Image (cartoon, rainbow, N blue to C red):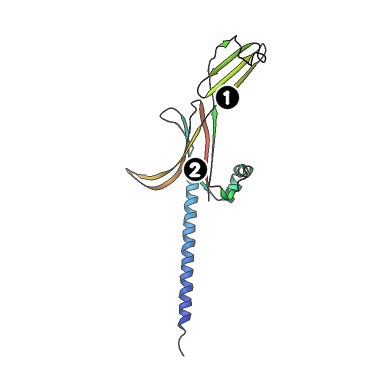
Amino acid sequence: MKFPYYIIGVALLAALLFGIGQRAAVRRLTTEKERLQLNQQALLSRIERYRTDSGRSAIACQRLTLHHEELRAAKAELAAEVKALRIRLSRVESIAKTASRSELRFVAPLTDTMLVGMADSCPQRLLTWRDAWTEVRGCIRRDSAEVSILSRDTLVQIVHRVPHRWWFFRWGTRAIRQEVVSRNPHTQLVYTEYLRLE
């Protein structure tokens, strides 16, 4: 009776496919472990606030990588914002959120002159002040002041890789970091967050 060699062939093929499947599973788990380690590092790191060489307010944070389900659970307000824009969450690649506040102190002289168009609405004294970023107009009456403040700003967001460093050597990627710079000199950046979806 001849030995059935096809059984050995089928067993070897099954073992090979099992090994390939296990290797892919190990690779997936390793990638997930690295993602979770980077997320933990990003959550434990502090947001850095600083001034650029030109004196502009800047803020930096590390990237947080989330799955779509994690975004829905942990950042429900951002998921609702995406839904309000009628964008499918599965199509979103990254979300950046930055908060700023503007504080401006100035002294403006009061005038008795009237601006055209404001003469009817402001029969008393007028206050005006402006620079490249902010415009203030006010009308001072006997018992009240009506003030309009218009402030313009541009936020520049730059996402870059932070390499591993040892002495003078740099290699690979230690973290993904977002830098946000405000163009308005009166603006102070308060908070930033950068999420990448997988």
Label 2 to label 1: alpha-carbon separation: 37 Å
- Disc 2, disc 1: CB below 8 Å? no
Residue 60 drawn at (x, y percent): 47, 37
Residue 126 to residue 148: above or below: above
Residue 128 drawn at (x, y percent): 57, 16
Residue 5 to residue 75: above or below: below
Q: Is residue 64 left or right of residue 126?
A: left
Residue 77 drawn at (x, y percent): 61, 42
Which mark's residue is nearer the viewer, 2 or 1? 1
* Label 1 element class: strand
Q: How many marks?
A: 2
Residue 182 to residue 198: above or below: above
Residue 150 - label: 1
**Amino acid on which the number 1 mark rests in the picture:** Leu
Q: Residue at x 54, y 31 (%)?
A: 100
Q: Along the line of sight, which residue is nearer the eye, 89 or 25?
A: 89
User: Could you classify mark 2 by the number of other residues whose Cα lies within 10 Å: few (under 14), some (14-19), or many (20 or more)?
Assistant: few
Circle 2 sits on which residue? 44
* Label 2 element class: helix
Q: Residue at x 49, y 61 (%)?
A: 25
**Amino acid on which the number 2 mark rests in the picture:** Leu
Residue 14 drawn at (x, y percent): 49, 73
Residue 52 to residue 38: above or below: above
Q: Residue at x 46, y 63 (%)?
A: 23
- Pick whichever of labels 2 and 1 is earlier in the sequence: 2
